[in-house]
Image: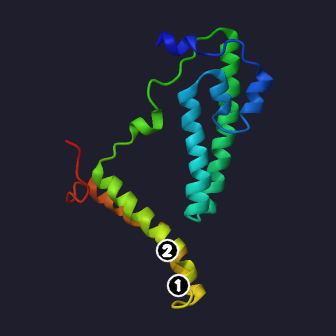
Amino acid sequence: MTNQINRINQKASPALTLLFSILPGAGHMYLGLMKRGLELMIAFLAAIFIVADLLHLAEIGVPLCIVIFFYSLFDAQHLNKAIRKGEEVADYNNLVFLSKINLNGYHMGIAAMALGFILLLDRLRGYMVYFIPSAAYSIVERSIVPLLIIVLGFLLMKNASGGSDIIPKKE
């Protein structure tokens, strides 16, 4: 723990912290909080590239990016203030968000299949318009992710209520 505390940038400038915080996570990294910064940067970039661009869910991705941006901006400023006051600020031992997710091979397989199917539809768009009217294809393409989320929600509810073991439980 002491190594992580010693890596904190004790002389971090509030102005530079603010400047670096324009890219979520970079301000934390400037302060020496590499794991916090990495987690915020991954979340922000995932919201942009995966949610908003790849899955075409800008209505979710854009608000998520805004929340992550402002959280990162204000959190870096508060941490900088705490460091300047001499308070002990430590980086995470593990990546907080990623360490709380309990994924097994089954979950990874479902995610890979869903993402592969979405990418396949995206890649075949140019060819599909010859066989399916473009309006129908657009409806199908925009409906897949919400339908997958609904199915996942039902599976999680069924598993939580003691239903069948569709999703294997961790032993």
Q: Residue 161's spot in the image, x, y percent? A: 26, 55
Q: Nearer the viewer, residue 147 or 161?
A: 147
* Residue 76 visible in this rendered orientation of the protein: yes
Q: Residues within 10 Å of mark 2 (few under 14, many from 20)?
A: some
Q: Toward which corner of the image does residue 94 lie, by quadrant?
A: top left
How far apart are the two marked residues, 2 and 1, measured between alpha carbons?
9 Å
Q: Is residue 137 above or below residue 121?
A: below
Q: Horizontal placement of 13 versus 58: left or right?
A: right
* Residue 121 image label: 2
Q: What residue type is disc 2 on?
A: Leu
Q: Horizontal placement of 108 versus 96: left or right?
A: left
Q: Secondary structure at mark 1?
A: helix
Which quadrant does the C terminus fall into? top left
CB within 8 Å, label 2 to label 1: yes
Q: Residue 90's spot in the image, x, y percent? A: 54, 18
Q: Residue at x 49, y 67 (%)?
A: 119
Q: Secondary structure at mark 2?
A: helix
Q: Which residue is mark 1?
A: 128
Q: Residue at x 69, y 20 (%)?
A: 80
Q: What residue type is disc 1 on?
A: Met
* Residue 142 image label: none
Q: Residues within 10 Å of mark 1 (few under 14, many from 20)?
A: some
Q: Residue 39's spot in the image, x, y percent? A: 54, 36
Q: Residue 145's spot in the image, x, y percent? A: 48, 67
Q: Residue at x 56, y 44 (%)?
A: 43
Q: Residue furthest right?
A: 15
Q: Earlier in the sequence, mark 2 or mark 1?
A: 2
* Residue 149 visible in this rendered orientation of the protein: no
